[in-house]
């Protein structure tokens, strides 16, 4: 009995040294029974090694394998080659399984590890890979009525809208304009850009400019075919032999209260032309100019527009200067543009709106 108690005491001391606490319980025979209770210890988190230390540990761990590879260990080399073959086969299988055609012109949402990412296939670079564009777009500019009508009849439909900007001398057809029930893109356009002639640009460019006599004479000589009244040769001679003389005549003198004299004078400029001074200098002349650069049909005369021009001259620092003023050239050019508008409306059987499209 004593030996059993000594063994139990020795066992309790040994278990207590290992973190076990003895408890007393009663057995069925009424004798005390010891039960063990585990003591919980709070575990401290393991400190993470620095990145350099982790890399060194991996290198030390893999060093034997690399050493065996260098020494030609067949088991290691076979495994490396097998792994490479398996990897190539897996990549080929993934490529074959993942070859999915994408619809150009569509935007996709692709899930990634960093979140969804947009894949835009509706760019100019992607659209150029299509066999043909999905719809008609573009801006075509022509310079004569015949070209405008040819393109218009090929691409226009019942909902095409046509506008004219008289100031810009441009007729614009929106070939895919919105319909009455549905919107359309409106990005397929045809423009008839009317250009002015060199003759019109020259006359309009010198309008209301004071020119030296020699420069004015050279200008008339280059555009004699545009002069209608007086005769071109006569107007050129007038410009060439033009003379002007200014005389000053004192009319009166008034004595002011301060004792100063206030002089009143009259200034008269006499003009004459011709070798003998027997040509009358006109106050106005008339021209006829082709305004727009449009082709002329065979057997027809070009469309020209008449303009009046008022003649002015003056002596400035002893030099004669000449100027002409065209009578409302903007109205003449507007009439020329509207004449083309009427021609297009009649040929295409459409109504052209005044203004500019959106």
Image (spheres, rainbow, N blue to C red):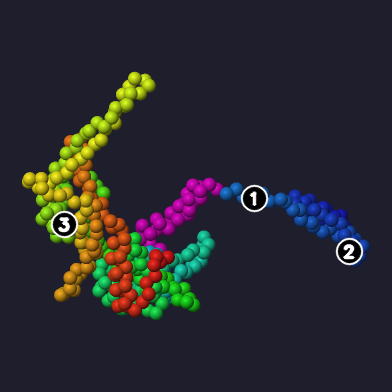
- Magenta stretch: dominant SS? helix
**Residue under numbered circle 2:** 27
Residue 260: horizontal and vertical position, in percent?
32, 22
**Residue ID at (55%, 48%):** 49
Q: Nearer the viewer, mark 1 or mark 2?
A: 1
**Residue ID at (47%, 77%):** 180
Q: Looking at the rendering, in which quadrant would you find the C terminus? A: bottom left
The image shows residue 136, relative to residue 61, as above or below, that is below
> Which residue sits furthest left?
275
Residue 125: horizontal and vertical position, in percent?
35, 66
Q: Nearer the viewer, mark 1 or mark 3?
A: 3
Is residue 5 visible to us here?
yes
Task: Give yes or no for residue 57 being in the magenta stretch.
Answer: yes
The image shows residue 35, relative to residue 315, as above or below, that is below
Check disc 3 and report its element: helix, strand or loop: loop
Residue 95 sits in quarter: bottom left
> Which residue sits furthest top?
259
| Label 1, label 3: how far apart the Cα atoms are | 113 Å
Residue 96: horizontal and vertical position, in percent?
40, 75
Residue 3 sits in quarter: bottom right
**Residue ID at (37%, 69%):** 163
**Residue under numbered circle 1:** 45
Residue 198 sits in quarter: bottom left
Q: Nearer the viewer, mark 3 or mark 2?
A: 3
Is residue 99 visible to us here?
no
Boundaries of the magenta span: 49-76
Q: Judge by depth and name the residue closer to the eye, 208 or 86.
A: 208
| Label 1, label 2: how far apart the Cα atoms are | 42 Å
Q: Looking at the rendering, in which quadrant would you find the N terminus? A: bottom right
Task: Give yes or no for residue 196 being in the magenta stretch.
Answer: no
The 10 Å Cα crowd at callout 2, few under 14, some 14 to 19, many 20 or more, is few
């Amino acid at each position: 009995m004593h030996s059993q108690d000594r063994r139990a005491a020795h066992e309790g001391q040994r278990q207590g040294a290992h973190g076990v606490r003895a408890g007393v319980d009663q057995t069925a025979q009424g004798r005390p029974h010891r039960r063990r209770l585990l003591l919980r210890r709070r575990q401290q988190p393991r400190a993470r090694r620095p990145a350099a230390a982790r890399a060194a540990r991996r290198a030390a761990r893999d060093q034997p394998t690399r050493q065996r590879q260098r020494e030609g260990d067949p088991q290691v080399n076979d495994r490396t080659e097998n792994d490479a073959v398996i990897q190539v086969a897996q990549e080929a299988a993934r490529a074959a399984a993942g070859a999915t055609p994408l619809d150009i012109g569509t935007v996709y949402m692709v899930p990634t590890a960093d979140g969804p990412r947009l894949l835009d296939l509706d760019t100019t670079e992607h659209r150029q890979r299509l066999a043909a564009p999905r719809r008609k777009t573009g801006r075509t500019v022509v310079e004569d009525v015949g070209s405008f009508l040819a393109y218009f009849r090929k691409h226009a439909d019942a909902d095409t809208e046509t506008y004219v900007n008289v100031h810009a001398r441009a007729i614009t057809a929106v070939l895919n304009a919105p319909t009455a029930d549905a919107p359309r893109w409106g990005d397929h356009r045809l423009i008839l850009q009317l250009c002015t002639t060199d003759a019109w640009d020259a006359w309009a460019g010198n309008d209301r400019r004071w020119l030296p006599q020699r420069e004015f004479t050279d200008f008339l000589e280059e555009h004699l075919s545009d002069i209608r009244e007086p005769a071109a040769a006569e107007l050129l001679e007038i410009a060439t032999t033009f003379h002007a003389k200014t005389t000053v005549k004192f009319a009166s003198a008034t004595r002011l209260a301060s004792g100063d004299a206030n002089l009143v004078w009259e200034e008269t400029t006499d003009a004459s032309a011709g070798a003998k001074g027997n040509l009358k200098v006109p106050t106005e002349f008339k021209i006829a100019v082709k305004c727009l650069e449009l082709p002329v049909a065979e057997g027809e005369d070009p469309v020209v527009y008449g303009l009046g021009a008022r003649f002015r001259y003056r002596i400035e620092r002893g030099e004669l200067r000449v100027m002409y003023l065209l009578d409302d050239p903007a109205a003449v050019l507007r009439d020329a543009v509207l004449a083309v508008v009427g021609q297009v409306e009649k040929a295409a059987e459409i109504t052209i709106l005044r203004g500019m499209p959106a």
